[in-house]
Image (cartoon, helix red, strand yellow):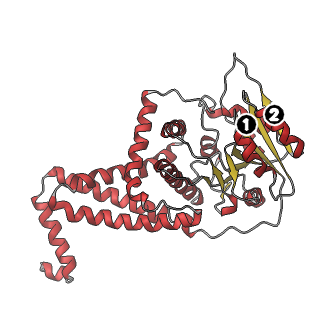
Amino acid sequence: MLPESRIFPNIALYSIYMYFEQLIATSDPFHLALAGTLLLSFLVQLTWYLVVFTRIPTVKKSTKSEEIVPVSVIICARNEAENLEKNLPSFLTQEHPDYEVIIVNDCSTDHTEEVLMDLKLKYDHLKVTTINPDRKFTHGKKLAVTIGVKAASHEQLLFSDADCYPASAKWISSMSKHFTNGKELILGVGKYQRKRGLLNIIVRYETLFTAMQYISFAMRGNAIMGVGRNMGYKRALFFRHKGFASHLKVLSGDDDLFVNEAATKTNTAVEIEPDSFTISTPPQTAWRWFKQKKRHLSTGKYYKRSSKIRLGTEYLSRLLFYGSLFWLLTYQEWLWMGLTAWGTLSLVKLVIVKLTMRRLEEKDLLLPSFLLDPLLPLILAIIRISNLIRPREPKWS
């Protein structure tokens, strides 16, 4: 048998080998299980970042299409008078030669109708459809979206929200160019305004990470979800899947559940150029953001099994990595291994997150990611537990 010095001619490798050999020999089964959990979750996280999340920083810029398609922009609004007055002109002054904007006024009790009537006098390509309140019949946003789709004059549809505005006058052109390539479903980036405060950092980082997930998977041909603040699809796709019939009982999910059901490897495109972004007003209070995430996360259980496995793998591996890491760091003999794993993974994450931030034009989130990367799974876990305790979904507003 060859001596160990012949098997490991490199002194550093030999030292590492001896370190682990001694550690394994002197450790109890509990610490070995923790170390195994740390190593496995480390490898899973590393795979996520090096294989999946590198898609956004490395994708080539999309080219402009010479062909122009007519587009119907659909925005559903309930008591959004102030937001419509502020944001709607940005949708109505797009540099696209053939489009209409449809506002579905869903049972508003504020002065939404007056705002829309004033804007309609200035913009003849604004169409308004109103849903009147009915005490005997309550409904969610899906009815408003369906009415908007049926009211559309064009086959190509783009969607956004009343509290959003396009990042540029080329938003419609940037998103709709993919329809000319035979695509039926277009996923865009919906960002939040950058403001002061810890809550704003948490909201924008969570939004960035969600975008990293759904955009990266869509680029790999496995679209999981999209955000209603910025997405589009063809009317034919909507009617072919009978609208929201398969998940009509779920109050939320007019965006992510539809994408999860309708997206295929060949019919979906992603647009991440800055002209295609939409910008939203961030939640002003932690409770409002909590309720918003509670509504969003309530739809996850209705995803396809493959989608739940993909998302669950990242979520669970991150929880296990930081959980086992913090526990092992309390034992001096495992300190070197824990710090090495954390340092290596942190370096990889920082590089990829930085490149992604640059591509999506985000700022001031790199340093906070050190703290938010381990904390975000815990925050989302609390929200998920809240959904289990009080499963009733909040109404859209």
Identify the mark at residue 81; answer none if there is no mark. Answer: 1
Residue 106, given in percent of the width and then of the height, sits at 73, 31
Q: Secondary structure at mark 1?
A: helix
How many numbered discs? Answer: 2
Instruction: Tell me the residue at 85%/36% (across/down).
Output: 117
Identify the mark at residue 114; answer none if there is no mark. Answer: 2
Residue 389 is left or right of residue 234, and the answer is: left
Residue 361, given in percent of the width and then of the height, sits at 59, 63
Instruction: Tell me the residue at 77%/44% (across/down).
Output: 235
Visible residue check, residue 55: no
Query: Looking at the image, which residue sits at the far left?
Result: 26
Of the image marks 2 and 1, the number of the one nearer the N terminus: 1
Residue 344, given in percent of the width and then of the height, sits at 34, 67
Residue 200 is left or right of residue 157, and the answer is: left
Is the residue 297 above or below the residue 35 in the image?
above
Residue 244 is left or right of residue 352, and the answer is: right
Residue 24 is left or right of residue 185, and the answer is: left
Marks 2/1 in contact by CB < 8 Å: the verdict is yes
Residue 141, given in percent of the width and then of the height, sits at 67, 33
Visible residue check, residue 103: yes
Query: Looking at the image, which residue sits at the far top?
Result: 136
Instruction: Tell me the residue at 75%/67% (across/down).
Output: 64
Q: Residues within 10 Å of mark 1 (few under 14, many from 20)?
A: many
Q: Amino acid at mark 1?
A: Ala
Q: CA distance from mark 2 to mark 1?
A: 8 Å
Is the residue 297 above or below the residue 215 in the image?
above
Instruction: Tell me the residue at 31%/57% (across/down).
Output: 40
Q: Residues within 10 Å of mark 2 (few under 14, many from 20)?
A: few
User: In which quarter of the view is residue 25 placed?
Assistant: bottom left
Q: Secondary structure at mark 2?
A: helix
